[in-house]
Image (spheres, coloured by chain):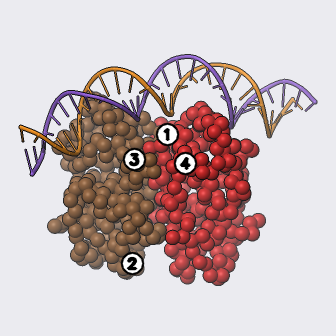
Chain colours: A red, B brown, C orange, D purple
Amino acid sequence: MIETNPFITKLERRFVLATDVKTALQSATAHVHTIGPRTDLIRGGDTPEHLHLILHGFACRYKIASGGERCIISYLIPGDICDLNVSALGAMDYSIRTLSACEVMRIPHEVIDDLTTRYPILDRALRWCSAVEEAISREWLINVGRRVADQRIAHLLCEMLVRFNAINLVTTDSYNFPTTQADLGDATGLTVVHVNRVLQRLRNDKLIVFKERKVHVLDVNGLARLARFDQGYLHLTST
Amino acid sequence: MIETNPFITKLERRFVLATDVKTALQSATAHVHTIGPRTDLIRGGDTPEHLHLILHGFACRYKIASGGERCIISYLIPGDICDLNVSALGAMDYSIRTLSACEVMRIPHEVIDDLTTRYPILDRALRWCSAVEEAISREWLINVGRRVADQRIAHLLCEMLVRFNAINLVTTDSYNFPTTQADLGDATGLTVVHVNRVLQRLRNDKLIVFKERKVHVLDVNGLARLARFDQGYLHLTST
DNA sequence: CGTCGATTTGAAATCTATCAACGATGGTGG
DNA sequence: CCACCATCGTTGATAGATTTCAAATCGACG
């Protein structure tokens, strides 16, 4: 089981949470499910009556484009909520898929409503989560729209470094990233073949090493310089 | 002045609004500003204390990428709110710019809070607006990431047709679209030159005509077929 | 009339996709 | 234990899409 809730870890980067808020959050940990790797957690069209919070593992949002190609909309890591605003839409218009094995916590909407009314700071925190996800989405749009292949991959790797770091999952500039090159292509709008060649270049330039489903960033500054990475959009550093 | 509020028009596609809700929304119309074309309405870094609702005209969200290129994140049309979730982030991490002259309504956050607590349906409506914008953002990501140039432009033109139609601003398959080819490029991740060539192809294929800042869609089905357009993601048709 | 921005055109360069194939790896069942 | 299969990473050659650069045209407007 998870002793330290990554959701709380993430929120505490930005908010000061009183002890009762944290225990209330922890106590909602009742429904924890374990899901195998590479399986759909939620499908487009579903109307989930719970919120899904990732406690452990690695997943993604994706859509199948009308041409049949899979597109990864965003990566989900511990502390991320999979389906924050679907209740407003009625049905999912995208799917959620695990990439590694995952521990997922299901929180009924009523519990969320109860928590946010009892603790206004949680209401603000959830809105903040949603707004940060939108900001990441905007940055992905820029990534795919206006950066060349090398920068796209580099930028994505920088983003994941910062996001994993925010939940204390980075040690010596390396983090778990159990994604295939095909996944990376679907996330950056590139072909598998081209992703492969880009990764080779980044490796030759001594910027990163991809080994055993882990990314080792050898030269953080070099990678960030190549990607022109500016982490402001992640809104993690309290201003 | 505006007699029919496009925001209400949009919401009534999805929600049944009681008369008192509508009059409450209308009466908030106090602060209406007129802004000239091609001017920044809000800048990145600002912390606006109002919500900005477009009543008339055409605008866009944009960011300047670290390489200096302007990227258009989304188009804003009458009935759209420019900065729905910035209050959760503290400061804007993007900018808003008018493309045509605009009438913009400024609503103080307190008024919004008051309205949403008095009328829960408005709270749901705002969440719905936010969720739809996220869905559009996802589709733009797919557009730029996985479609070829012709499809990108065609898809964007289809989307705008449906969105303008939802606020009754389409007559005989044509709508106001006061955007330059450079803007279109910034929105689709293409160069001006290439946008120009794509538009010529679409014109030659008798799919659209671009004249006097208006788009005339000559062959709706043909355009939608080329773009493989499916309007489901706009969540406008009540299921 | 001259200027500025927007559209258009042409030619060449570059990036990325496509196609096809091979090797490595890991799991599975006989 | 080995053969088999599926998935993933890798490579080479070629085609195609898009960018880049440079310049011409057009239209609106003071």
The image position of residue B105, as x and y in percent, is 26, 69
> If you read the primary sequence from the N terminus, does the residue marked by circle 2 or circle 3 appear first?
3
The residue at the point 54 percent across, 70 percent down is: A238
User: Distance between the Cα atoms at labels 4 and 2?
Assistant: 42 Å
Q: Which residue is mark 4?
A: A225
Chain letter for mark 4, please: A
The image position of residue B61, as x and y in percent, is 36, 56
Callouts 3 and 4 on one subunit: no
Chain letter for mark 3, please: B
Q: Is residue B19 above or below residue B174?
A: below
Q: Secondary structure at mark 4?
A: helix
Q: Tag 4: residue type?
A: Arg
Q: Secondary structure at mark 3?
A: loop
Crowd around label 2: few <14 · some 14–19 · many ≥20 (10 Å):
few
Q: Tag 2: residue type?
A: Asp
User: Distance between the Cα atoms at labels 3 and 4?
Assistant: 16 Å
Q: Is residue A46 above or below residue A124?
A: above
Q: Which residue is mark 2?
A: B113
Q: Is residue A111 visible?
A: yes
> If you read the primary sequence from the N terminus, does the residue marked by circle 4 or circle 1 appear first?
1
Q: Which residue is mark 3?
A: B69
| Near-viewer residue (B206 or A162) | A162
The image position of residue B133, as x and y in percent, is 41, 57
Q: Is residue A101 above or below residue D2?
A: below
Q: Is residue D14 above or below residue B153?
A: above
Crowd around label 4: few <14 · some 14–19 · many ≥20 (10 Å):
some
Chain letter for mark 2, please: B
User: Distance between the Cα atoms at labels 2 and 3?
Assistant: 37 Å
| Near-viewer residue (B65 or C18) | B65
